[in-house]
Image (cartoon, rainbow, N blue to C red):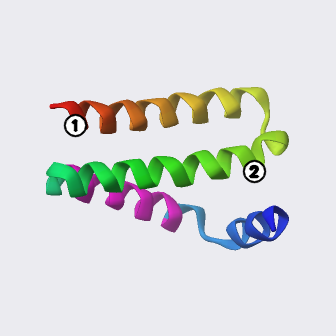
Amino acid sequence: MATRVLAVLGRLNRTAVFLAASALVFVALLVGGGLGTLALLALGAGLAALLIVSWSQLPAPGRAIRLVLLTMLVALAVVRLTA
């Protein structure tokens, strides 16, 4: 299953995926409240799942960057949840 997911994701346009993820974060920040926080946490969960699946294929600097970005996204969601 994981190999199939990576194969499908590998065929997607990287720019389109980046723009879609950025738009989701932007909308989640604009919506605010519980719905925005839920969207950020859902995006974080999806990114964490992708990171787990693709971990062995990533070089060390790529792993570090993705971990930092995932941590920042989840921290933002937690701050919004507690504020």
Residue 67: % across, % down:
59, 31
Residue 7 part of the magenta segment: no
Q: Quadrant of residue 7?
A: bottom right
> Front-most of 56 and 41?
41
Residue 28: % across, % down:
26, 55
Q: Residue at x 71, y 44 (%)?
A: 52
Q: Which mark is residue 26?
A: none
> Front-most of 55 and 15?
55
| Residue identifier under label 1 | 80
Q: Residue at x 59, y 45 (%)?
A: 48
Q: Quadrant of residue 51?
A: top right
Give the side of residue 11 with respect to residue 26, left or right. Answer: right
**SS class, disc 1:** helix
Q: Residue at x 79, y 34 (%)?
A: 59
Q: Is 18 placed above or below 29 here?
A: below
Region rendered in magenta: 16-29
**SS class, disc 2:** helix
Q: Is 4 placed above or below 30 here?
A: below
Q: Quadrant of the C terminus?
A: top left
Q: Main secondary structure of the magenta part?
A: helix
Give the side of residue 31 with respect to residue 71, left or right. Answer: left
| Residue identifier under label 2 | 53
Q: CA distance from mark 1 to mark 2?
A: 28 Å
Residue 20: % across, % down:
42, 65
Give the side of residue 82 with respect to residue 19, left or right. Answer: left
Q: Residue at x 32, y 53 (%)?
A: 38
Residue 81: % across, % down:
24, 38
Mark sitting earlier along the chain (1/2): 2
Q: Report the amino acid beneath label 1.
A: Arg
